[in-house]
Amino acid sequence: MELTLHEAAEKLRQADRIVLTAHEHPDGDAVGSTMGLMYFLQSLGKQAQVILEDKVSKNLHILPGAREVRQLKWEQEIAEKAAEEAAEKAKAEPESEKAQENPAVNAGEKKEEWEPEPVEADLLVILDTSADRIGRVKDVVKAAAVINIDHHITNQEKELPVYVDGQAAACAEILFELIRAMGGDFSKNLPMAQCIYTGLATDTGFFRFSNTTAHTMHAAAELLAAGVEPNVISEALEVKPYEDIMSLAKAMEHIELLHDGRGAGVFLDYETMQEIRHTDGIVDMVRVIEGIDIAVVMKEKIKDNARVSMRSTGLDVSAIAKTFGGGGHVRAAGCGFRNTPFETAKAKLLSAVDAALDAYVPGTGEEGTPGNV
Ligand code: 5GP
Ligand code: MN
């Protein structure tokens, strides 16, 4: 069911307890959009909180309040570690009555599945994705109503009220308009401005990708006027530990040219991933290879579960991603292979890439700088 921005605003106005969420592996737009809207709703006196499935990356901790976001994976890690420690302690002192009574010990012994604390809400707002990529948030939040706001052209949400603007460079660009339409003033709320700016900046490759429009720039200008310091945000987002740079160097050794040099890929199977701690951003290094129409990165962090990132200069990679259950944009898309041996997944992806390259005549697609996430 399609929703207008005005109707979305109305739903937000009517609700009091609101949970905001976004996709797994949250990027700058996912975190910036959810937190930006959270700050706005809180300024209206509403109870608004952000809950995400995965952890917010350390770089995004530059955003005020990012550490306080509920991150289910993080909660799970803490709970499991506590249970493990308690179990160790109980083993070390089996006679201790205290340890016997400790519920964490019992949980550890029985290997009970950890379950996140549920939350009741009037409204759940899903941002920067459709409902299928929010992980356990959909079970944790008991919401009376749900709405979806997104900028992905592949968003196929049929059941929920949904507002999709495929022209918006970032979900944060939609929220910029929504917040203004609801009377929000960025100059009075710096954290809100910083979060929305981060969404705009990261999804446009810092205003370089072809999704950057005059509207994106006007929005960014207003956020700078409100006090956002662009260099502070970009420097915090770019910085990487030395070990991560060394990991990227190792990963780069795996670059291979595809299809007579019309594509380039990095394929990192489970064994290789054991030596490579960090690969975020590698696709951006591959995509700049001269003369290629497509860049792909496939990594198997979890055995038989490969994740794929694709970038192009015009060829529609979202169509390739869709055939494997993923999605995204024309020039930036992704998908995952579940319970599939790495070599099988790689062969399937490569055959789809070959077919797409055979069918694609450079210069006839939606040309532009790759990226557009
Ligand atoms: P990235 O390669 O940066 O992870 O993702 C590129 C773009 O594709 C982003 O807009 C992201 O949201 C989208 N994307 C990545 N993986 C998936 C997926 O599995 N499903 C869908 N629907 N979109 C994805
Ligand atoms: Mn986005």
Image (cartoon, grey):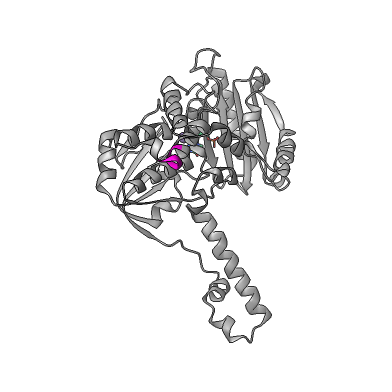
Q: Nearer the viewer, residue 292 or 217?
A: 217
When the figure is inspected, residue 296 is found, relative to residue 274, above or below; the finding is above
What is the quadrant of the N terminus in the image? top left
Magenta stretch encompasses residue 121? no
Left or right: 18, with 321 as reference point: left
Q: Nearer the viewer, residue 165 or 361?
A: 165
Q: Nearer the viewer, residue 271 or 88?
A: 88
Left or right: 109, with 135 as reference point: right
Could you tell me how many numbered marks the image carries?
Answer: 0
| Residue in the picture at 54% in, 76% down | 106
Magenta stretch, main secondary structure, is helix
| Residue in the picture at 36% in, 36% down | 185
Q: Position of residue 141 (x, y in %)?
A: 37, 55
Q: Position of residue 35 (x, y in %)?
A: 44, 44
Q: Quadrant of residue 157?
A: top left
| Residue in the picture at 67% in, 18% down | 290
Q: Is residue 253 visible?
A: yes
Q: Position of residue 19 (x, y in %)?
A: 37, 50
When the figure is inspected, residue 247 is found, relative to residue 86, above or below; the finding is above
Q: Is residue 325 visible?
A: no
| Residue in the picture at 67% in, 20% down | 261
When the figure is inspected, residue 169 is found, relative to residue 342, above or below; the finding is above
Q: Which residues are magenta?
A: 189-193
Left or right: 227, with 176 as reference point: right
Q: Position of residue 340 (x, y in %)?
A: 58, 44
